[in-house]
Amino acid sequence: MTRPVARTPARFGLPGTERVRGDLAAVGLFNDQGPTAGSEEILTAIGRSGRPEYAVQGLARLVEACSEQERVILLEALRGRPRFRGRLLGILGGSTVLSEHLGAFPEDWHLLLPEAPAEELIEVPGMRVALAACVGLDPAQPPATGTEGARASLTGGKAIAALRRAYRSQLLIIAAHDLAPAVEPSLPTTALPAVCQALTALADATLQTSLSVAAAELAPGAAPARLAVIAMGKCGAKELNYLSDVDVIFVADGPAGQATDDTQMLTTATQLASGVMRICGGAAWEVDAALRPEGKAGALVRTPASHAAYYQRWAQTWEFQALLKARPAAGDPEIGERFIEITAPGVWSAAGRDSFVDDVQAMRRRVEDNIPENHRTRELKLGPGGLRDVEFAVQLLQLVHGRTDTDLRLPGTLMGLRSLIRGGYVGRADGAEMAAAYTFLRRAEHRLQLQRLRRTHLLPEDRSDMEWLARVDGYGASGTASAAEVFIAERARHGATVRRLHEKLFYRPLLHAVAAVGANELRLSPEAARERLAALGFRSPEAALRHLAALTVGVSRRAAIQRTLLPVLLDYFSSSPDPDGGLLAYRQVSEALADTPWYLRLLRDEASVAQRLAALLGGSRLIGSLLTRAPEVLRLLTDDDALLAPRPETVAAALLARSRRATSALEAADAARSARRQEMLRLACADMLGLITVTNIAAGLTSVAESTIKAAYEAAVQQVTADRGGFRARLTVIGMGRLGGAELGYSSDADVMYVAEPLPGQDEQEARTDAAAAADLMARLLGRPSPDPPLEVDANLRPEGRSGPLVRSLDSYQAYWTRFAAAWERQAMIRARPVAGDEALGVEFLATAADFRYPMGGLSARDVVEIRRIKARVDAERMPRGADPTTHTKLGRGGLGDVEWTIQLLQLQHAGAVPGLRTPRTLPAIAAAAEAGLLSAADAGALRDGWLMASRVRNVIMLVRGKPDDQIPRQGRELAAVARVLGYPAGGDPGEFVDDYRRTARRARKVVDRIFDGG
């Protein structure tokens, strides 16, 4: 006959396995007919526990270990005392280790009988007495302060075993009160702060007891010493987890009023400190002293004077941030208080340190960067939206505003958050959300650690363990969702809240400080707003507040959207190399595009665009200066493919078509320059985002420069034709230098020469006059003052330089090269390449110049000496005064000049015989020289790497500074910005980049010394 469903264990949410049925029968809760009399409430409570099968097994093991009389008492208590029932079954179903503890020490179940309100849990009754008694301490004696005070009668392994037993018994009490409400929902929830403070009190008692044991282990005659144990981290803040390491700092001094030998005293104190760490580690948890001065490399124990000297001279910002939670926990109270007095001033002045912002941001990034990728979604503590985000936000706000507001000087996270709310630094609604999220995350962390008493912050991967965690935290199935699924959804909600508030708590109050919005919102005072901006990296808080006011004040739709955007953007700006420049540029762009309907909507709706824009403006002044007149590029930031999509031929065709629609030469040139601005901005954005190589940037910049020159050329010729009634010349523009080599950077001029021939039947002089007028007009159109960046056309490489005619015929060039040309002019011609004008004439020019620039017999020894002499003079005369030759990208050792002069010398010497060397471009020439055996593979690699590094760095300097410069910045934010754009980690040492540059340049220079100088 089938057993009725109502009479099976499943009716109470229990597995129907033979093991469960047998254990229930052994306990006396179930028999063949169903539940025994009065057992239904117990069975129901077991069904609500974390893992009912574990609870049943643990209860059976406990009952079996009890005497017959004890079993009767235990079962009666389970039936008649709901609070006790919740505590016992909460432990049995929630923690395998504590359940095993009860099985090993069954008498400890009596510890769960006393009733105590949650607020009294902070001082667990008899906690210190219980721990002291277990090692034979007399509670009436004064506690040990080092070599003074009561000493334990048990030492060594016996003391550790006894202390472990007593510690677990006290932990059992705390955990039972914590877990009971999930099993008996009618019970009041034990507040998280009460649990944390109880765990901290237990830790303090364990440290104090361990010190008494360590003192008893000292050899007779040990030098007298007083030792203070300073709790740090969660223990210092009285926010301890079940399985946290306990962070401490040890401070020692001799007996009060007595002269002592510090060396001997510190020897004794170090023995005591080491003993405390060993005893606690064996009995309860690890004691970590790595937060002490100099970390693990520093002395374990220092005197107050030694600590004072260290924190005054050497301590880093993070060490003062850690000291925010410092608290005397055990040992000599007078020395502990002295340590706090010594360090407190540094804590509350840390936000004024020059390195404060960089240090704090670097610490935050380091925490997130160290999370393994496969752990990010499971991390309760370190991941995005985790506990560390809350703690970081609260601590930073305390450090910033606690300089002037002493009410904020509290160690705990929730205490600190409440004080920030009271002081008006955090809105009440935001603060309540943050506190709720923090409480959820900490409770989850506690229950996760209680499962097996392991120190972990990772959510389980195992589905059954996840269900266990959710049930222990009081979650049940809802609809079709399991308890685990309900818990995971709640965790995602709280994580998103933390991430959102992390931005909002820092930045939205700044908007309230300058804009009269949100009548119910708390507002920062102007001084508090300035303090916060300064701590977030803004060097001119006053200016930043003006920018915020200009963007957000008012009731317009634009102001409302800006108030939504700016909390996020300010976070990005504060993490950028130049927060002030980024915010200023953003204001300028926003004002310039105020009437562009899609601009703010794009930033609001496309989070990636807002993030990228802030990164670009906070890292590149060039982009800020280009963006106001080329806003269309913003649309490309949504998609990398779109940002990289334009091709040189497409851009050239569009640019020329745009200029040809103009009605005047000036309008045509301006149209071309405007299009060039947009293309430069596209390339700069792709460059800053690390999406494009330096060679592709050079190709893109060269292509758009050529197209701009072509457009200006056409416009100039048309204008001269109109003015003179015709144009009597064939004219071509020859690109020289970097333009000819297709190697332009952001700051490059366009070096050119002009070649003209009269049209058939035209007067040569008139033709030359027309051509010169067009060439002059073209240069003036491209270089005249305008909102668009100029393209300076430089014809100084022509024969006779500025004193020679602007335009020459082929015969004139040929005659000059034959009779007057210097060796350097041969070298300059290597890069000659037609870029605009009459194409056939350009081909003729190259044919005419071939023998001059690629002499079949190579260079004479005299010419080689002359080229070397000229380079030496250029390096000496043009190197700016005070420049560092090891980091000057153009004229420095191993820089662009060194590499280009070297490969061009090889071209002059061998291109007559080696066709592959007949190229205006540097990298193909290096490759051709290696292929021809003129360079070894290693030498070619060194020259190539040096040229690429110098070219890339030179471009980045222009991006960062917004103006040309060949010198790597020596220090400060500009150096950090250059390193960051080059891909070095944010917050890292930019000196690493400088070292890499010098190393690469040195390798190139060694080749230059050997090949160019013949060394």
Image: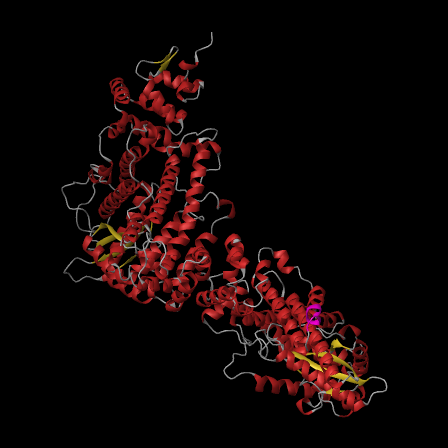
Q: Does residue 372 appear left or right of residue 356 in this picture?
A: right
Is residue 775 one of those drawn in magenta? Answer: no
Boundaries of the magenta span: 656-662
- Classify residue 244 by image quadrant: top left
Location of residue 41 by image quarter: top left
In the rendered structure, the answer to whether residue 64 lies left or right of residue 636 reads left
Q: Nearer the viewer, residue 249 or 181?
A: 181
Q: Nearer the viewer, residue 29 or 1010?
A: 29
**Image vertical order of residue 695 relative to residue 486, above or below:** below
**415 displayed left or right of 964:** left
Report whether residue 703 is seen. Answer: yes
Q: Is residue 657 magenta?
A: yes
- The picture places residue 653, in percent across and down from the top left corner, at 72, 67
Q: Main secondary structure of the magenta part?
A: helix
Image location of residue 710, percent across then percent down = 71, 74
Can you name the residue that lies furthest to the top here? 1
**Residue 461, how many percent across, how many down?**
48, 37
Q: Is residue 744 visible?
A: no
